[in-house]
Structures are given as C-alpha cells and as structure tokens.
Image: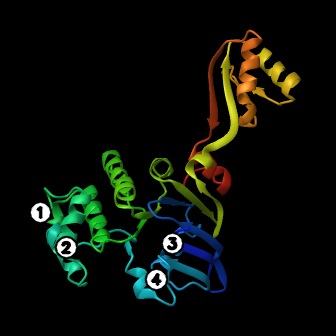
Amino acid sequence: MDTPVLNVTNLSKSIKKKEIIKDISFQLNKSEVLGFLGPNGAGKSTTLRMLVGLSRPSSGTISICGHSIRDDYVDAMSHVGCIIEGPDLYEYLSGYKNLELLGAMSKQVTKAAIDDAIALVGMEKRIHDKVSIYSMGMKQRIGLAQALIHQPDLLILDEPTNGLDPQGIHEFREIVKSLAKDKGISVLISSHLISEVQLMCDRVCIINQGMIVRDGTVSEMLSTGEIVWVLNNPAQGQKILSEQFKLESRITVQNELIAAIDLEILPKINAILIASGLELQTVAAKNTTLEELFLSLTNHKAIQ
C-alpha cells in the first residue's frame, strides 16, 4: 500500500492547560482532495498551523510523504505548498515578479517551474500586470501559483475562496480539481463554504470541539441508506414492504415511499411491487446534503 501523502496520528494541542485539539487522526492519499470542515473555534486553523510547522503539537505525530514534521522538518516541508491566512503579495510588483522573488529563495525553483505554475492557475495573460490592479480572484490565483512553484505533492489551503464572487469560486474549484486529477497533487482544503466542499472534495473530515466527528468519502457521508420510490399507490407499496419484507417505511407529503433496505434485495422488492400492479415512476437512493450532516454533527443552527 502506498505511503499516505499526509499522515496525522493522535495529534493533540493544549494552550494554557486547555486542550484545543484532542487526539485526532486522519490521512490524505495521493491525488485526493480532502475537505476540512468545522464551526468557528472547532480547531481547524490550529490543526493547519501544526501541519505546516507554525505551531508545535503537544503530542502525536505528523508525517508528509513519509517524513516526520518533528524529526525531518526540512524534507517534510519540501513536499508542501500552502496558503495559510491568505496569499502574501507585494502590491506594487507584478504577479510574475512576486513569483520570481519567492522562487529566488530556493535553488530548486526554476523559470520553467514558475511558468508551469502560472499556466496551471490560468494567469498567463495578466501575469505581468501589477498586483494592485488584480481582482480578488486573480490574487488568489497568484497565491495558488506561489504554493505550486516548488512542485509540491501536498497543497494546504486555508479558506482559499474567501472574498471571491460565484464565478471566482467556480474557477478556483475547477483549478483545484484539475491539480488533483491531472497533476496527482493531494489537496487539504479548509473552508466554511460547505456546498463548495461537497462539489470539490473526494473526502471530508468534520472537526468539532477539537475532535474528528466524521471522516469519509463524500458519497458515503451523503448516503442515508434509504431508497425512495415514486409510485401510483404508495399506501399499497407500504403494505407490501411491511407484510412481505418486514420493513418499516414512511410516506412523505410528496407521496414518496421511503425505507431503509439492504440494496441486495432491491431488485426483488421492485419486481414484487410491479407484479402487484403498481406503476414505478422512479426508484432512487435518498441522500442528505453535506450542510445538513454538518449541522447535525456540530449541533449548530446556522453555519459559522
């Protein structure tokens, strides 16, 4: 099995004897996009700061591409590109000059690497304009290019779509998905835009009060394990489910028949419903939304 790009094991952090992060563990594999969700004060930023060495864990381990942050920091961080607390840009310089200055700090960054990063974020036409005239979306693209010039295996992005309009958010989402799919880069993205995380990420970690309360693929999280039938006589369908399959079900105000079932018996159920003279219009899995799941797990009445 391949070594995870990011491996966090039993990580804890206490500040002034208060435990902020409580024994959390999660992994990020190659080419995955992992969403890191939580309400304000849940521990997202504290965790991200530990991942990039800006804060020291009280206990636990962090490894990046097999290198320990604690014991092999330089090699570990050589695999990482990040935007924490927004991109840091010189407004009076061009986008290209900003990238050049950052690249000059490392012998490994070549002109070709800078040009490749510019192409990846789609800034070729405006790269020589001054940053001061860039839109927020363009500045975020340059920030992303800064994180990419070292050709990292892992991207860590903290609220990267803050301040972007819907078009900018859509464009940024497509760039991130392309980086994972086409370049094999693993991405850890912290965001409060739950709908965007649902669209962008392969997996999601939800953190609340310093603990990981759910970690799984988006499809796993959104599946309720229930089936929805739309048919001409839901009451008769409900009776069949009860009498022949010993299944509890409910009928919604939209006259949909819903039951939690083992998917292996779904073809048999459908066959009996049809044989009983019922007309099946649609049969589909019932899903929740990531927002509904998030609110239920964090006991929040509104998104923070």
Q: Indicate the position of residue 143 as horizontal and vertical percent values.
A: 29, 67
Quadrant position of residue 206: bottom right
Q: What residue is rendered at 82% in x and 20% in y?
A: 240
Kindly report which numbered mark, 4 or 1, lies closer to the viewer in this rendering. Answer: 4
Q: CA distance from mark 2 to mark 4?
A: 23 Å
Residue 201's disc number: none
**Mark 1 highlights which residue?**
129
The answer to whether residue 18 is visible is yes
- Its colouring scheme is rainbow
- Amino acid type at circle 4 is Gly
Specify which label sits upstream in the sequence, 2 or 3. 3
Q: Secondary structure at mark 1?
A: loop
Residue 98's disc number: 2
- Amino acid type at circle 3 is Leu
**Mark 4 highlights which residue?**
53
Q: Left of 143 or right of it: where is 302?
A: right
Q: Using a 10 Å C-alpha cutoff, classify the residue at mark 3 as few (fewer than 14 neighbours), some (14 to 19) or many (20 or more).
A: many
**Mark 3 highlights which residue?**
6
The answer to whether residue 234 is visible is no
Q: What residue is rendered at 72% in x and 29% in y?
A: 266
Kindly report which numbered mark, 2 or 3, lies closer to the viewer in this rendering. Answer: 3
When the figure is inspected, residue 38 is found, relative to residue 230, above or below; the finding is below
Q: CA distance from mark 3 to mark 4?
A: 14 Å
Q: Indicate the position of residue 69 as horizontal and vertical percent values.
A: 49, 84
Specify which label sits upstream in the sequence, 3 or 4. 3
Q: What residue is rendered at 37% in x and 56% in y?
A: 176
Q: Looking at this view, is 102 or 3 the one in front?
A: 3
Q: CA distance from mark 1 to mark 3?
A: 36 Å
Quadrant in the picture for the N terminus: bottom right
- Amino acid type at circle 2 is Asn
Specify which label sits upstream in the sequence, 2 or 4. 4
